[in-house]
Image: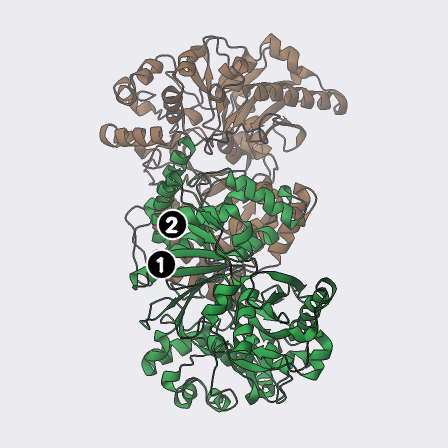
Chain colours: A green, B brown
Amino acid sequence: MMKEYVIGLDYGTNSCRSVLIEVGAKDELFSAVYNYPSGEQGVLLSAKAPHLARQSPADYLDGLEFIISSVIEQAKIHLSDFRSEAVIALTCATTGSTVIPIDHNAQALGLEDKENLNAQAWLWKDHTSHQEANLISEKAKILRPQYLERCGGTYSSEWFWAKILRLKNIDPATYAKAHSFVELCDFLPASLAGIREPKAIKRSICAAGHKAMYANEWGGLPDKEFLNELDPALSDLRDRLYDEALESDQIAGYVCEEWAERTGLKTGTVIAVGAFDAHMGAVGAGIKEGSLVKIVGTSTCDLMISKSKQPIAGVCGLVEGSVIPGFIGIEAGQSAVGDLFLWLVNHLGTNEYGKNRDEVFKNMTAQAAAMSAGQSGLLSLDWNNGNRCTLVDMQLSGLMLGQSLHTKVHEIYRALIEATAFGALKIIERLEESGTAVKEIICCGGLAQKNELMMQIYANVFNRPVRIADSEQTCALGAGIFAAAASKNMAVLELQKQMTNDCRREYLPESTEVKTYEQLYALYSQLYEAFGVAGSQDDLFGVMKRLIQIQKEAHHA
Amino acid sequence: MMKEYVIGLDYGTNSCRSVLIEVGAKDELFSAVYNYPSGEQGVLLSAKAPHLARQSPADYLDGLEFIISSVIEQAKIHLSDFRSEAVIALTCATTGSTVIPIDHNAQALGLEDKENLNAQAWLWKDHTSHQEANLISEKAKILRPQYLERCGGTYSSEWFWAKILRLKNIDPATYAKAHSFVELCDFLPASLAGIREPKAIKRSICAAGHKAMYANEWGGLPDKEFLNELDPALSDLRDRLYDEALESDQIAGYVCEEWAERTGLKTGTVIAVGAFDAHMGAVGAGIKEGSLVKIVGTSTCDLMISKSKQPIAGVCGLVEGSVIPGFIGIEAGQSAVGDLFLWLVNHLGTNEYGKNRDEVFKNMTAQAAAMSAGQSGLLSLDWNNGNRCTLVDMQLSGLMLGQSLHTKVHEIYRALIEATAFGALKIIERLEESGTAVKEIICCGGLAQKNELMMQIYANVFNRPVRIADSEQTCALGAGIFAAAASKNMAVLELQKQMTNDCRREYLPESTEVKTYEQLYALYSQLYEAFGVAGSQDDLFGVMKRLIQIQKEAHHA
């Protein structure tokens, strides 16, 4: 029998990548990466608007051609009997909400209107829409409280409707040119399928879920009466969006002639419905009931699956079928993790640690690893990009405390790692308080694979073992599993078992560090409450003193 | 009539310098600088004890020889009729409390015991003695409240007794070798005079004042009963210290043969009593009643003179005659100002801004100056080295808030400048609340001379004109004025008039910036209270949000 293959695509914040995998086997055979050439590492920024983050749709399509054709080329070279029809399906895992305005022909406006930042893709981490998000939260609280139950009680400026309404408010001319809007994870399958009619684009339930406030219970997208309260334009727009959203074991379309030619795929190859990277990544990482999968990248997504629909305050998404068909996908996350370290290296300057970024990280990590918990005397919050969970508040910002005149960059680096660990522990605590037992923690993504110091700190802060997913490409692997499921009409959990390895690496908590981190976490929690929770009136006078005390003990331990 | 000259010496944190001045004239003729070669820019540090800061006494004496002989050499070359006997007197302005343990022969222990950090000079900014300072404050509160009234209500870990007690507690062997202790400003005159008997060393009232809790009212140093409560060893030590402290228009001794030979001074040249740099600097800057003189350097000293002895809470010193004989010298200050910027440049790495430190500062300043108040979105406290006034608490530490993922180093630099301005405004407010009207603000020191951005920000934050002292060497000039006063038995205020110029530069407040800074100062005050004042329970939830709002307005203004 001829071997069958799938291609999983993973569209991240700075690059996109592909993996070619044999259906039913555990090897990721070939992969390719494309770094988005536009802007600052692929992100279009504005000096005047520090919360703006856009991307060029042309980068997406140029990358699409490159990463697919590259793995097919590799397969042709290295697999003697390979023919392109052996690739039976593909789909994508992408960032989100990454919202693209499109015209009547389903073309991204940014492909034509290259100079206008508002016509580009509005990247997930664009936080310009917080006023609009606040309006949506306020209106929903009064008119449609059920909408908010699925998204942690607060609508985020990172999400679909906030971004669309923002565009309408600040650039009505561009809004008028936009016939409809599409998530990146739906844009790529539609492009591959050559779909030229916006309403014919298949939509992902994972993206539609809480981010577009879509649920079967209330008939799909928010009703027109509610949208009208936000802005009559949104009520009009509803007719030009979609009525149905699909799980990713469904078919979004078939590769069209143009894209078959550009990529080397066979015309008619199955394209499964796309989904957000973290959700597919969780499948590639081996998610099951009781597992918390953390996709640790520029930001972090935390995924669990559950049979319960019980809302969880401050946890940003509960969507039926968003991870595995038949389960509720629970999504939480932190707005900045790897991005914090990139900020440190790119903007605070760390040339003394090495000649290039890799060398800087290597040496900074070595020096940070030589320290014990508490020794830096620093305590940081992880809010430089807002707080997605459990505060769901993008109007929060960074805070670093405890600096002396001798504080070094690698100490700040360690404090930032610790801050992300403390923020992650807040989420774990919230999940468990809400009755979702976390029996296992699996981390995946580049940082989980490479940053041993970080994973050891996580184990120590969590006081639990931290397992590392075996695949280095869990998002792309997950996309491949869904592509196979859609093409062969098989169960995702069955294919997951066939196509993923068990975790082989595990970090265990170290008791001395655990004790110190308990004390530091108590201080972190004080700052978290004071700056993050309205009306909390804690006495913070002791924070700096306690930190100095912990530092002294850590140096004499 | 033969022209007469004096030499003023200024011992700073990283270097010492000399100025040769004609008595009764306004020109500073020659000067020389010596950078202390030991440690990190002259400061001996310990990786294990981040609050430790010591200095090598050998650096002091090597510098003394160099800076005196250098100006005498210059005078010989450039002044045709110059002879060394024309130098009629000299004295020094130094950092303090910088406490030096000495042996039976009045030799610094650190000259012999070079490897032992505890045997060296304990630099003003050494903060290892906070437990001892707390003990002194606690005991004095109960037993001798009058002692605390003169030092703002709290004894500081930067001061004389705390450092001595610390040495005794952590290194009894070295303490046992120390026959007595001397401030740097008394050590240098005694060295020049060749004094070999500790009790023969003349002591400065300026240094003795609140830092050694000396006052004529209670018979000089703290009584033995009180010292015994701290530690019996201190009670014993009292007999080996001093009974009398002098103003700096008095004579400390005469240059001995050895030092005449080493420097080119004539044997027998008058040495006036030394004093702390800021106090002499205030005289060189033109202090009068109603002037607040800010000596802006690595840290900042704020000086006023007054006829009132009314205690001022949180203002660290009120000492009769410490600035101008016949007046109460009021001393306040901030523990780190220029040191904050040095920390930024030395430890956070700013190579992108230039190739060396001067270039980095120049370019960072230019980029920071291109911004308006509020645009960075940052808010910082100025406590990386504790808070000397008005909280008098060395167990405070740095805090930076409002960072995004795009925050740049020059924005942090601007936020640190602003933090020092806000801290300075707290002191001005406290002085005025206590009835000491601030009619004029004069800044002096290197930063005041060179950093136009900083001085403009100060004027905007204070909402008052900021004048710049005409002399670039106010401390050394002040020392020269005192040397002349001691030698010629003239009034300091009369010589000050003859030997200092009026301020020629002035920064005026800019109304738009003033308005924004009023808002930022309100937020700074919230953090100041929350972290600095026990029992204050403010709701800090709004701080980050308000800051983002101010930032947005600043970008659209």
> Which residue is labeled 1 in the image?
A438
Q: Secondary structure at mark 1?
A: loop
Q: To which quarter of the image does residue A17 belong?
A: bottom right
Q: Are marks 2 and 1 on the same chain?
A: yes
Q: Residue at horizontal 35%, vertical 34%?
A: B151
> Which residue is labeled 2 in the image?
A464
Whole-number angstrom distance, CA of label 2 to CA of label 1: 10 Å
Q: Is residue A77 left or right of residue A91?
A: right
Q: Which mark is residue B379?
A: none
Q: Verify CB contact (< 8 Å) between mark 2 and mark 1.
A: yes
Compare residues B171 and A74 and report the one nearer the observer: A74
Q: To which quarter of the image does residue A550 belong?
A: top left
> The disc labelled 1 sits on which kind of residue?
Val
Q: Secondary structure at mark 2?
A: loop
Visible residue check, residue B251 = yes
Q: Residue B243's spot in the image, x, y percent?
A: 37, 16
Q: Is residue A531 above or below residue A217?
A: above
Q: Residue at horizontal 37%, vertical 40%?
A: A511
- Most extreme residue toward the front is A1
Chain holding disc 1: A
Q: Is residue A285 above or below residue A461?
A: below
For the N terminus of chain B, the image quarter is top right
Q: What crowding class fits label 2: few (fewer than 14 Cα within 10 Å), some (14-19), or many (20 or more)? A: some
> The disc labelled 2 sits on which kind of residue?
Arg
Visible residue check, residue A95 = no
Chain holding disc 2: A
Q: Is residue B450 above or below residue B212?
A: below
Compare residues B254 and B209 and report the one nearer the observer: B209
Q: Earlier in the sequence, mark 2 or mark 1?
A: 1
Q: Residue A65's spot in the image, x, y percent?
A: 69, 72
